[in-house]
Amino acid sequence: MKNIIFNNKLILIFRIILGSVFIYASLDKIQDPAAFSSLIDNYRASPIWLNNLVALILPWIELICGLLIIAGYFVPVANLLIFAMLILFVILLSQAVIRGIDTHCGCFKVQEGVENVDFKKQLIKRIIEDLILLAMSFVVLLKSFNLLGEKKENN
């Protein structure tokens, strides 16, 4: 089982998926940081000044980490940031569901149609997606930091 999960090809697939998701997620937020800040504010979890700062910085971190993890540069650091962001996203989305906050996720698009949308269902769907991505990131994390003590292959 360990050989299947930590197969280099599977790790590469996980890196490509994670990188692609984070690159895609960053693009709309980079283009409209004001709308993204408003979406962050809807979660009622942080002060407005922090929301503005996060709206300006987070999308660029998502983009850079996505590019790095796909390209294979600084994979441990890029993936560690991705892992941390995913944990934060799961916590933020979960607290919104628990508190009954009806808001658009803002995960990929800052301006989505909101007519007849079950926000709670959408947030739960995003939490599940983030947990799947978190599992992928965890596997990449174990491999990139060699946390299972695998012997390095000599080429």
Image: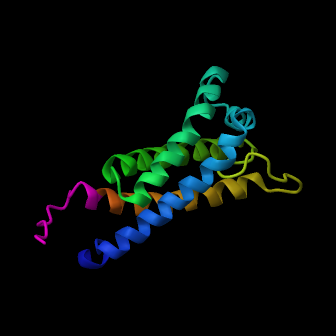
Q: Residue furthest right?
A: 115
| Residue sitting at x 61%, y 32% | 56
Position of the C terminus, as image quadrant, is bottom left
Q: State the image coordinates of residue 142 (x, y, percent, origin top left).
A: 27, 59
Position of the N terminus, as image quadrant, is bottom left
Q: State the image coordinates of residue 42 (x, y, percent, origin top left).
A: 72, 35
| Residue sitting at x 61%, y 56% | 24
| Residue sitting at x 61%, y 52% | 25
Span of residues in magenta:
142-155
Q: Which quadrant would residue 153 be assigned to in this image? A: bottom left
> Is residue 112 rendered magenta in the image?
no
Q: Is residue 145 above or below residue 155?
A: above
Q: Is residue 107 above or below residue 10?
A: above
Q: Please identify the dominant SS of the magenta region.
A: loop
Q: State the image coordinates of residue 75 (x, y, percent, origin top left).
A: 34, 53
In the image: residue 122, left or right of residue 58: right
Q: Is residue 10 above or below residue 62?
A: below
| Residue sitting at x 15%, y 66% | 150
- Of residue 142 and residue 57, the one placed in the foreground of this image is 57
- Of residue 110 and residue 87, the one placed in the foreground of this image is 110
How many tags in the picture?
Answer: 0
The colour style of the image is rainbow
In the image: residue 130, left or right of residue 6: right
